[in-house]
Image: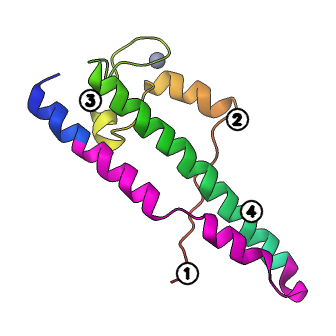
Amino acid sequence: MVQENKHEVRQQLLSKLEELTRRDSREELIRERCNDPMDQMQNRFEMDLTISVINNDWVTRKAVETALKLLEIDEYGICQDCGAEINPKRLEAIPWTTLCVYCQDEYDCSGVAAGRPSYSRAA
Ligand SMILES: [Zn+2]
């Protein structure tokens, strides 16, 4: 990988990491706990969403951290499962991906990865 690209990718990864840190949802989870029992069903639903957002962020954060490490050792863009080169278009779309599209498919189907809920925080 070219040095300039490497620099650019690192910046992308670092800003993603910062974004994940900023929107840490744990406070929200604590707040949800002291609610009116009338809203319990709704709360449970929201809590589930919050938990899945936290899980999702955690998975992404781990991936970003791994990608940064791989960048250091010049293994960025190489699938950590099968060792194949990851499609550059895929890397462009998800700079912190550490798996090629085939291995990612397998990973997603194994049920390890959390879904991606479309959840926007209330202001
Ligand atoms: Zn692979």
Image coordinates of residue 83 in percent, x first then y, are: 41, 11
**In the depicted view, which residue is nearer to us: 114 or 8?**
8
Question: What label sits on residue 111 in the rendered view?
Answer: 2
Which residue is at 64% across, 45% downward? 114
Image coordinates of residue 13 in percent, x first then y, are: 32, 43
Kindly indicate whether the residue at mark 2 contacts the one at mark 1 (C-beta within 8 angstroms). Answer: no
Residue 82 vertical position relative to residue 71 in the rendered view, above or below: above
**Which residue has dot 3 on it?**
88
Image coordinates of residue 108 in percent, x first then y, are: 61, 34
**Which residue has dot 4 on it?**
48
Q: Of the residues shown, which amino acid type is indicated by label 1? A: Ala
Residue 38 vertical position relative to residue 19 in the rendered view, above or below: below
Instruction: Please state the extent of the stretch shown in magenta in the rendering.
Output: 11-40
In the image, which is nearer the foreground, mark 3 or mark 4?
Answer: 4
Q: Left or right of 93: which side holds 106?
A: right
Inter-mark Cα distance, 1 to 4: 15 Å
Kindly indicate whether the residue at mark 4 contacts the one at mark 1 (C-beta within 8 angstroms). Answer: no
Q: Of the residues shown, which amino acid type is indicated by label 3? A: Pro
Which residue is at 50% across, 38% downward? 62
Q: Earlier in the sequence, mark 1 or mark 3?
A: 3
Q: Earlier in the sequence, mark 4 or mark 2?
A: 4
In the image, which is nearer the foreground, mark 1 or mark 3?
Answer: 1
Which residue is at 70% across, 77% downward? 31
Q: Earlier in the sequence, mark 1 or mark 2?
A: 2
**Which residue has dot 1 on it?**
122
Inter-mark Cα distance, 2 to 3: 26 Å
Q: Left or right of 32: which side holds 95?
A: left
